Structures are given as structure tokens and as C-alpha cells.
Image (tube, grey):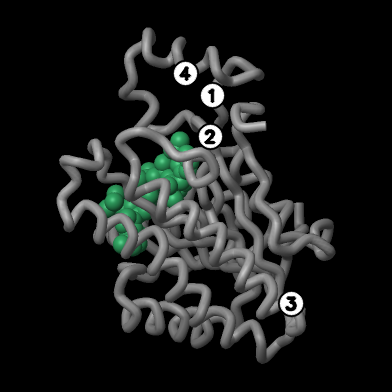
């Protein structure tokens, strides 16, 4: 498949998890992929796997909550590939606990990585995309940003904030031919959900009309659609990938 041939795609937090599946899917569709993460060893491995598939890929170590790091990551991308066509703001963390027990640093760390990090990356990438008057940005939010969740005041605030950022950036960047959209996954089979007991999983499945968890590939498929020519008239949109949980 060559849907993204000659496109340059940067995915944050793509050493492992959903981000890695997004990065591999873009590579499979012909893109040159910048793998970016705080995790160097796993990030190098992901970039190597992409090169072994015959695609161009580099790993750039970057903490998205550090604006200097982010500016350096975008500069390295442009140095290597001359442009950036697609940015996927995927890096994210959780520090779950009930609000009354939540420490200042639990709040700050989650907001700094999930929301401020996405702002830094969007700002830096948009400057490059504006020069070419084309590009797409896809933010990985969460259904929790739409509905809230106990024990996740910090995480749900960051993911709701990401939706506000998506819509504002979509309005600001539309005149320059850049689309900005968000994907809001529900329960996705990852290391995180694998740790849950069967009983807890069954309880969660009862509130999902499709009665199962999603796969990282379900998220990746939606990201690729939003970044593709097929979605060129879609901006400021939030697409849930949640089996109908929050319809
Ligand atoms: P993972 O923890 O598996 O992957 C996230 C990646 O981001 C990790 O490699 C992580 O590194 C990296 N990362 C963490 N902090 C930073 C940072 N400061 N700068 C750059 N990279 C960083 O998460 P998932 O794959 O499960 O989730 C991916 C995205 O999808 C997240 O935004 C998450 O909120 C969202 N999401 C996930 C759902 C799910 O069910 N799994 C549901 C809804 C949304 P490290 O391991 O060192 O932390």
C-alpha cells in the first residue's frame, strides 16, 4: 500500500504500545516515519523494524514536556526529510488516584506530558507545515476526556483539554491548509488492560455495546484515515474508537 508514499510522519511516544502500531501502520502505507519517545532503546528498535520493512525511519529521543527538546525533534525531522506532513500527538501517561489523594506532581506530570506536550509539538510542527500550506495533526485523546472517570481527574482534564486544543488549532490552521483532529479511544487491549482481572474486564465489557475491547490497530486505522486525503474536508473533529461506549 502506498497511501502515504513520500509523506513524512512523526509519532510521539511511538517506542511501544498504540504509538508503535500507528508508526508501523504509516510505514506499511509507504511513509517515512520519525519514531519519537523518551525510551531510547525501544525507540531505536521500532525505527530499525521500520527500516527492515524497506521504509525510511529515524528515532529521535524527545521528552514532549520540554519545549527545547520538542523544537530539536522538529528540527531533526526537517533536517533529515525536508518537511513534516503528519504529526500524531500520542505520548501520554496516567497517574491514577482519587482526587483528594492526588499529589501536586501527579496533576502536573500528567498535564505537562499529555496536554502541554501536545501544544509544544503542535506549535513547532505547525510552523513547518504552514510553509508548505499543507499538513495534518492527529491528537490521541480518550473517551475519558468526554465523560470523566473516577481516579482520573488529572488524566481526564488533560484529555478534555486536548479536545479544546484540537478545535482551536483546527480553526487557526485551516486557512493554511492544515487539518487538526482527535481520536478518542475507549478500552484498548494494551499492557495496561492486560493487567486487569477477567472479572474486571467482564464488568467493563457490559458497558460497551460491541461487548469487547478494541485493538491498537483500530486506533491506528482511524489515525491513518484522518491523516489521509480521504479526510481532507474533516477538521476539528473528534472520532471515538470505543465500541459505542460513549455514544
Ligand atoms: P503506553 O504507555 O504503552 O505508550 C506511551 C508511550 O509514550 C510510551 O513509550 C511512553 O514512554 C511514552 N512517553 C511517556 N512520557 C513521554 C514523554 N514525556 N515524552 C515522550 N514520550 C513519552 O500507552 P498506550 O499505548 O496505552 O497509549 C497511547 C496513547 O493512547 C496515550 O496518549 C493514551 O493516553 C491514549 N489512550 C490509551 C488507551 C488505552 O486503552 N491504552 C485508551 C485511551 C487513550 P514510557 O514507557 O517511558 O512512559
Label 3 to label 2: alpha-carbon separation: 28 Å
Q: Earlier in the sequence, mark 3 or mark 2?
A: 3
Q: At x 80% / y 58%, what residue is drawn?
A: 231
Label 4 to label 2: alpha-carbon separation: 10 Å
Q: Is residue 81 above or below residue 233?
A: below
| SS at mark 2 in the image | loop
Label 1 to label 3: alpha-carbon separation: 34 Å
Q: At x 33% / y 60%, what residue is drawn?
A: 111
Q: Is residue 177 above or below residue 179?
A: below
Confirm whether residue 42 shows in the render: no
The crowding category of the residue bearing disc 1, from other C-alpha atoms within 10 Å (few below 14, some 14 to 19, many at least 20), is some
Q: Which mark is residue 174?
A: 3
The crowding category of the residue bearing disc 4, from other C-alpha atoms within 10 Å (few below 14, some 14 to 19, many at least 20), is some
Identify residue for label 4: 204
Q: At x 37% / y 14%, what residue is drawn?
A: 200
Identify residue for label 1: 213
The response on whether ligand 1 sits within 8 Å of label 1 is yes
Q: Determine contact: label 1, label 2, CB under 8 Å.
A: yes
State the residue in front, 196 or 164: 164
| SS at mark 1 in the image | loop
Give the x, y percent position of residue 117. Answer: 39, 68
Numbered disc in front, either 4 or 1: 4
Give the x, y percent position of residue 88. Answer: 55, 61
Q: Earlier in the sequence, mark 4 or mark 3?
A: 3
Q: Earlier in the sequence, mark 1 or mark 2?
A: 2
Q: Is residue 133 above or below residue 59?
A: below
Identify residue for label 2: 186
Label 1 to label 2: alpha-carbon separation: 8 Å
Label 4 to label 3: alpha-carbon separation: 38 Å
Q: Earlier in the sequence, mark 1 or mark 3?
A: 3
Position of the C terminus by quadrant: top right
The response on whether ligand 1 sits within 8 Å of label 2 is yes
Amino acid at each position: 500500500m502506498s497511501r502515504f508514499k513520500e509523506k513524512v510522519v512523526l509519532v510521539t511516544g511511538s517506542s511501544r504500545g498504540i504509538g508503535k502500531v500507528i508508526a508501523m501502520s504509516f510505514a506499511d502505507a509507504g511513509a517515512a516515519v520519525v519514531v519519537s519517545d523518551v525510551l531510547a532503546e525501544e525507540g531505536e528498535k521500532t525505527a530499525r523494524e521500520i527500516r527492515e520493512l524497506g521504509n525510511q525511519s529515524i528515532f529521535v529521543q524527545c521528552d514532549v514536556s520540554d519545549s527545547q527538546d520538542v523544537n530539536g525533534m522538529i528540527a531533526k525531522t526537517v533536517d533529515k526529510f525536508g518537511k513534516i506532513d503528519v504529526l500524531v500527538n500520542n505520548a501520554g501517561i496516567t497517574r491514577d488516584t482519587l482526587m483528594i489523594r492526588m499529589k501536586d506532581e501527579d496533576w502536573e506530570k500528567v498535564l505537562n506530558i499529555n496536554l502541554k506536550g501536545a501544544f509544544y509539538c503542535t506549535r513547532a510542527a505547525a510552523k513547518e507545515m504552514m510553509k508548505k500550506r499543507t499538513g495534518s495533526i492527529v491528537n490521541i485523546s480518550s473517551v475519558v476526556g468526554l465523560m470523566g472517570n473516577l481516579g482520573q481527574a488529572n488524566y481526564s482534564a488533560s484529555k478534555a483539554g486536548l479536545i479544546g486544543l484540537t478545535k482551536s488549532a483546527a480553526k487557526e490552521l485551516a486557512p493554511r491548509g492544515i487539518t487538526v483532529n482527535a481520536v478518542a479511544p475507549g478500552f484498548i487491549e494494551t499492557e495496561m488492560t492486560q493487567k486487569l482481572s477477567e472479572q474486571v474486564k467482564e464488568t467493563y465489557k457490559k458497558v460497551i455495546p460491541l461487548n469487547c475491547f478494541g485493538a491498537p490497530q483500530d486506533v491506528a486505522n482511524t489515525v491513518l484515515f484522518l491523516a489521509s486525503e480521504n479526510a481532507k474536508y474533516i477538521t476539528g473533529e473528534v472520532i471515538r474508537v470505543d465500541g459505542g461506549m460513549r455514544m
